[in-house]
Image: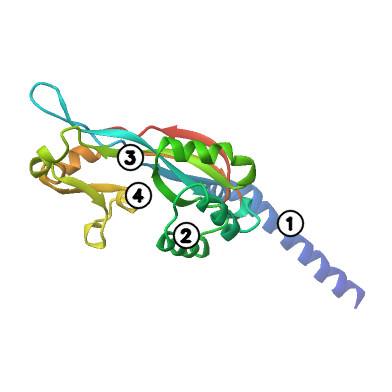
Amino acid sequence: RAIVLGGAQGSLITALIARMYYLQVVESDRYKMLADGNRISTQILPPPRGRILDRFGQPLAVNSQQFRVLIIPEQTTKVSDIITVLSNLIEIADYERDRIKREVGRHRSFVPIMVKENLSWEEMARIQVNAPDLPGVIIDDALTRHYPLGEHATHLLGYVSSVDEADLNGDPLLQLPGFRIGKAGIEKVHDQILRGKGGTKQVEVNAYGREVRELEIGRAHV
C-alpha cells in the first residue's frame, strides 16, 4: 500500500514538473506575447484636420485652439458636488449635467469626462484660479474648425459636424469622441483628404485598464 501511494505521489509530482517545464520553457514565447498584449494598449490619436486655402494661399478653413474642462471621477469625492462648484464659475446647463451623470455611470472611474467645451479665456482662467477647490478637474486644449470669412463662404466650404451612426464605416477614427467630419460643401467632398491619418500611442496599463505610463507615440498627420 505504501509503495502504491508513493508511486502515485511520484507520478503526480513528475506530471506537475513536466507541465511547469512545458509552460515556462516550451511555451514561454507564446505566453510572453499574450502577457504583452494585455499589458500594452494601443490608442488612436486624432489628426488635425487639413486647412483649406484659396488660390492665393489665403486661409478659408483652419483649426483654432479651444479649451475644454474635464473631470476624472476617481479623483473627486463626489462628482455632483464638484459640478455644483464648477457651475458657480461657468454656465452648465441642466442637459449637460444629465449627460455628465450618464457618462460617469457608463465609463470607468479613471476615464476623463468632458464637462464643457469651447471655454473662453476668462472661463478657463477662473477654473485655473480655483483649481485647489476642484479636485479631479483638468483643463484640456483641443482644436476646433474656424472659417475666417464667416458666412460669406458657407455655401462653398460647407461645415463639419459630429459623426452619426450612418457615417460609421469601420474607420476607427470615426469612433473617437468628439471627432468631426465634413457634412456639406468642400468639407464633405474632400473629407477623406482633409481628415488625414491618425497616429497611435502605446501605453502600459494595469489589470484594470488604467494607464500606467506612455511607451511610444506615432504622430497623426494630415
- Among the two numbered marks 4 and 3 on one chain, the one whose residue lies closer to the N terminus: 4
- Among the two numbered marks 2 and 3 on one chain, the one whose residue lies closer to the N terminus: 2
Q: CA distance from mark 2 to mark 4?
A: 15 Å
Seen at 53% across and 51% down, the residue is 88
> 13 above or below 76?
below
- Please give the residue where the numbered disc 2 appears in the rendered image: 100
> 8 above or below 199?
below
Amino acid at circle 4: Gly
Q: Quadrant of residue 212?
A: top right
- Among the two numbered marks 1 and 2 on one chain, the one whose residue lies closer to the N terminus: 1
Q: CA distance from mark 1 to mark 2?
A: 54 Å
Nearer to the camera, 212 or 32:
212
Whether label 4 touches label 3, CB < 8 Å: no
- Among the two numbered marks 4 and 1 on one chain, the one whose residue lies closer to the N terminus: 1
Which SS class for mark 4? loop
Amino acid at circle 3: Gly
Whether label 2 touches label 4, CB < 8 Å: no
Q: Is residue 191 visible?
A: yes
Front disc: 4 or 3:
4
- Please give the residue where the numbered disc 3 appears in the rendered image: 198
Which SS class for mark 1? helix
The 10 Å Cα crowd at callout 2, few under 14, some 14 to 19, many 20 or more, is many
Front disc: 4 or 1:
4
Q: Is residue 197 visible?
A: no
- Please give the residue where the numbered disc 4 appears in the rendered image: 178
Tag shown at residue 17: 1
The 10 Å Cα crowd at callout 1, few under 14, some 14 to 19, many 20 or more, is few
Q: CA distance from mark 2 to mark 3?
A: 27 Å
For the view shown, which residue lies furthest in the top direction? 56
Amino acid at circle 2: Ile
Which SS class for mark 3? loop
